[in-house]
Image (tube, grey):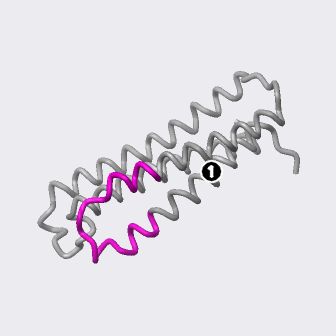
């Protein structure tokens, strides 16, 4: 299976996103009902910095292997299409979260939805899923065409 530089880059970004944020969110949601305090600021900063470092290393390695590939109209169209899907998903998730905040009394039995810790991690999950949708849509369109 021959893949272009863009596809390799997207696949690496998708893998790094799923690995880093999947690991973090798994740990956060597995201890969520037992630990209702706010997330540690240092923990989140370390996660983001580690993710940025890993992405920079992967992208640098891929850029060295594939020196010059210009972006064309197809790349821009694929990026625009995938961003539209990602934004739509994220907008729906944010609106659902806002409605949930307004209807807080109905969610009293779901501790993870009513604490700031739980809401923070749900919003982080929504942002990560939006990125996964963006990467996945781009990969799909590079393989199948626009």
Q: Nearer the viewer, residue 137 or 30?
A: 30
Instruction: Inspect the magenta stretch and tell me whether residue 27 lies in it.
Output: yes
Q: Nearer the viewer, residue 57 or 136?
A: 57
Task: Residue at 44%, 63% (x, y): give it.
Answer: 25
Residue 31, compared with residue 116, is above or below; it is below
Callout count: 1
Q: Which corner quadrant holds the C terminus?
A: top right
Residues in magenta, as a range: 25-46
Instruction: Inspect the magenta stretch and tell me whether residue 32 lies in it.
Output: yes
Tag 1 secondary structure:
helix
Q: Position of residue 48 (x, y in %)?
A: 47, 47
Q: Nearer the viewer, residue 68 or 91?
A: 68
Q: Is residue 133 left or right of residue 26?
A: right
Q: Nearer the viewer, residue 48 or 111?
A: 48
Task: Residue at 35%, 74% (x, y): give it.
Answer: 31
Q: Is residue 137 left or right of residue 63?
A: left
Q: Position of residue 126 (x, y in %)?
A: 41, 53
Q: Position of residue 139 (x, y in %)?
A: 69, 45
Residue 99, compared with residue 106, is above or below; it is above
Quarter of the image for residue 43 reads bottom left
Within 10 angstroms of label 1, few (less than 14), some, or many (20 or more) residues? some
Residue 34, compared with residue 74, is above or below; it is below
Residue ranking furthest to the right: 2
Q: Is residue 127 left or right of residue 60?
A: left
Task: Residue at 76%, 40% (x, y): give it.
Answer: 61
Q: Find disc 1 in the rendering and name its residue.
A: 14
Task: Residue at 15%, 54% (x, y): give it.
Answer: 102
């Amino acid at each position: 299976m021959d893949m272009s530089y863009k596809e390799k880059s997207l696949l690496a970004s998708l893998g790094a996103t799923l690995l880093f944020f999947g690991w973090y969110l798994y740990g956060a949601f597995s201890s969520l009902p037992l630990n209702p305090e706010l997330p540690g600021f240092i923990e989140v900063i370390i996660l983001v910095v580690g993710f940025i470092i890993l992405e920079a290393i992967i992208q640098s390695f891929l850029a060295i292997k594939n020196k010059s590939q210009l972006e064309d109209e197809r790349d821009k169209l694929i990026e625009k299409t995938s961003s539209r899907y990602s934004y739509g998903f994220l907008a729906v998730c944010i609106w659902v979260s806002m409605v949930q905040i307004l209807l807080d009394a109905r969610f009293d039995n779901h501790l993870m939805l009513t604490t700031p810790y739980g809401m923070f991690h749900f919003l982080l999950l929504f942002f990560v899923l939006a990125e996964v949708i963006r990467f996945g849509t781009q990969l799909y369109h590079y393989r199948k065409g626009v």
